Amino acid sequence: MARRVVITGGASGIGRTIAERFASLGDRVAICDASANNIAAFQMQMPDALTAQADVTDQDQMQVFFDQVTQHLGGVDVLVSNAGIGGPAGSIETLKLEDWRRCLSVNLDGAFLACGWAAELMRAQKSGLILLMSSTSGLFGVPNRAPYVAAKWGLVGLAKTLAMELGPAGVRVNAICPGAVEGTRMDQVLAMESDFTGRPAAEIEQQYSQGVSLRRFVSPKDIADMAVFLASDAARQITGQAMAVDGHTERMV
């Protein structure tokens, strides 16, 4: 039976790759994204998917999306709360409060709204899976990335708490913790850290890759493979876990 898969931040990057992977398995996919351009490109490739432009920090916009999902799909079997931003780079005393709040809002408020909606439906149907997209930055401290690290640690805590709340109803909740993921988002992070530290972006990139045992970046496909595995019967006893997909992080800096 086709599963109903809902993905926030699903029109590009990791979210889009996850959407494509589930769709290739015959599942019904719904995504929201803040970027109209990314949604248009997504629709060209996946015209059968339900799409909506929505800011995950805006409760009204997200409720419209959730209502569309309920109307068109009749519910949700898998929620991937993927929407997030990297936030600013800088030592804590140089950061602006509005940048801190924006980073936490997109990463945490968005997850809060999506999980609250999905939990009600999944609890009633006594089944479902919630995946929260954290990071290895949610497992380790990272200098000069305080807002992002705080948000990603928060998502791991949220996953473990919701696993306890929803487990008796047969609902599983896990966090996925990618390492450095190749793509435009990582390019932006490298440029931002280069601007702050004055070091070449290529040097910082090498530092990231040398900090993992496999000496290479993760691909979006690696993350999608983990999401599909966690949604399978093979993972039916896995809940409350922070699943690193990182090539084994030895050091963050």
Image: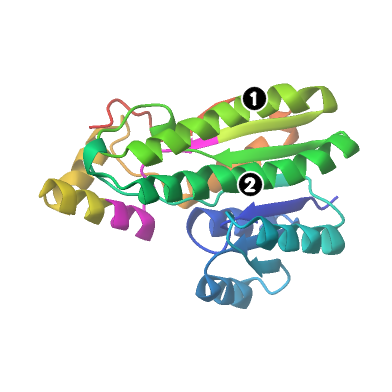
**Residue 187 lies in quadrant:** bottom left
For the view shown, which residue lies furthest in the front direction?
Answer: 97
The residue closer to the viewer here, 180 or 191, is 191
Query: Foreground mark, 2 or 1?
Result: 1
Query: To which residue does mark 2 refer?
Result: 80
Instruction: Give yes or no for residue 43 being in the magenta stretch.
Output: no
Q: Could you tell me which residue is drawn at 30 percent across and 32 percent down? A: 142
Query: To which residue does mark 1 refer?
Result: 161
Amino acid at circle 2: Val
Q: Relative to residue 190, is residue 174 depicted above or below?
A: above
Amino acid at circle 1: Thr
Q: Position of residue 76 (x, y in %)?
A: 79, 49
**Which region of the structure is painted magenta?**
176-189
Question: Could you tell me if the residues under marks 2 and 1 are in contact, i.e. CB atoms within 8 Å?
Answer: no
Q: Position of residue 34 (x, y in %)?
A: 54, 65
Residue 212 is left or right of residue 23, and the answer is left
Residue 11 is left or right of residue 137, and the answer is right
Q: Could you tell me which residue is drawn at 67 percent across and 32 percent down? A: 173
Which of pointers 2 and 1 lies earlier in the amino acid sequence? 2
Instruction: Give yes or no for residue 184 being in the magenta stretch.
Output: yes
